[in-house]
Image (cartoon, helix red, strand yellow):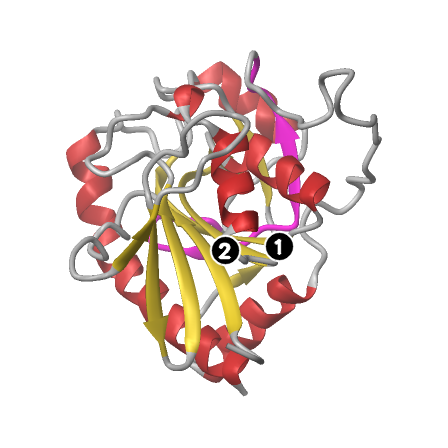
Amino acid sequence: MSGEITLGLIGGTGLTEWQDDVERLDIDTPYGAASDPIRVIPIGGVRLLFLPRHGSPHRFPPHRVNYRANMWALKHAGAEQVLAVSAVGGITGQYSPGTLAVPDQLVDFSWGREHSYHDSPDVPLVHVDFTHPYEGGLRRGVLDAARQASIGVVDGACIAVFQGPRLESAAEIAMARNAGCDLAGMTSLPEAGLARELGIDYAGLAVVSNWAAGVGGDSISEDDIAQTLKEPMSRVRRLLDALVAQLKG
């Protein structure tokens, strides 16, 4: 449709309710299968392309997600902008559990992941600039939508991307803090770098689910994380509605 607005959405915990009664796209990629079929969800005049990062049901841990196939599939389904929602641990003071943050920087502590499309003689080598991993119009749009909807978000955060699936040690979190990181996650890379290689405007929305190891003083349980995420994920869905309205104009 002429003038149609398409937004890609990658999500994991808390965004899996969009499962039934929607069109699904199975897109073949040169990099294998994406984590799941893409859900095509018309919302307020915007074509939302939702891809569950870990599959549905949840079956791919962070180090086993096929990030190259996921981003390639979204691009070839029509997404020029992709918003990635992820649960993270808080390292520094203003990122307490329940906080929403719009990150602006990344440090990669993961290893062994397929992190580039430029890794064979068949693909011309390009060294993409990654000075500012999140610098496009979508990031500004997320911040504007949050203001319009009166949803509190922290503008800016550096995410330390760890390998997973285990949570980090207190020493690893101390290292990340010393490196200038505010949040601990497991999925923002290679996602952001792959998006840059494909020319996709990629923005992140980080949902703080817990204090990172050694910060809050308590052990971290999956049950506690799931409980903590319930309320902020309702704010994420409100923010998405506001973003869709803004994109539609």
Who's the residue at 16% across and 56% down the image?
20
Q: Would you say the residues marked 1 and 2 are in contact, meaning their CB atoms lie under 8 Å apart? A: yes
Q: Position of residue 32 (x, y in %)?
A: 46, 25
Image quadrant in which the C terminus is located: bottom right
Q: Report the Cα–Cα distance between label 1 and label 2.
A: 7 Å
Look at label 1 and name its amino acid: Gly
Q: Is 208 within the magenta?
A: no
Q: Secondary structure at mark 1?
A: loop
Magenta residues span: 95-111
- Give the residue pinned by disc 1: 156
Residue at label 2? Answer: 101
Amino acid carrying mark 2 in the image = Ala
Q: Nearer the viewer, residue 25 or 12?
A: 25
Determine the residue positioned at 49% across, 53% down.
77
Tell me what residue is drawn at x 55 percent, y 40 percent: 72
Return the residue nearer the eye: 23 or 226: 23
Q: Is residue 205 among the parts visible in the rendering?
A: no
Q: Is residue 98 magenta?
A: yes
Indicate the position of residue 217 as horizontal and vertical percent values. Answer: 33, 29
Q: Please identify the residue farthest to the bottom as the structure is shown.
A: 249
Considering only vertical position in the picture, is 205 above or below 150? above
Q: Quadrant of residue 105?
A: top right
- Give the camera-side residue of 130 and 228: 130
Q: Is residue 210 visible?
A: yes
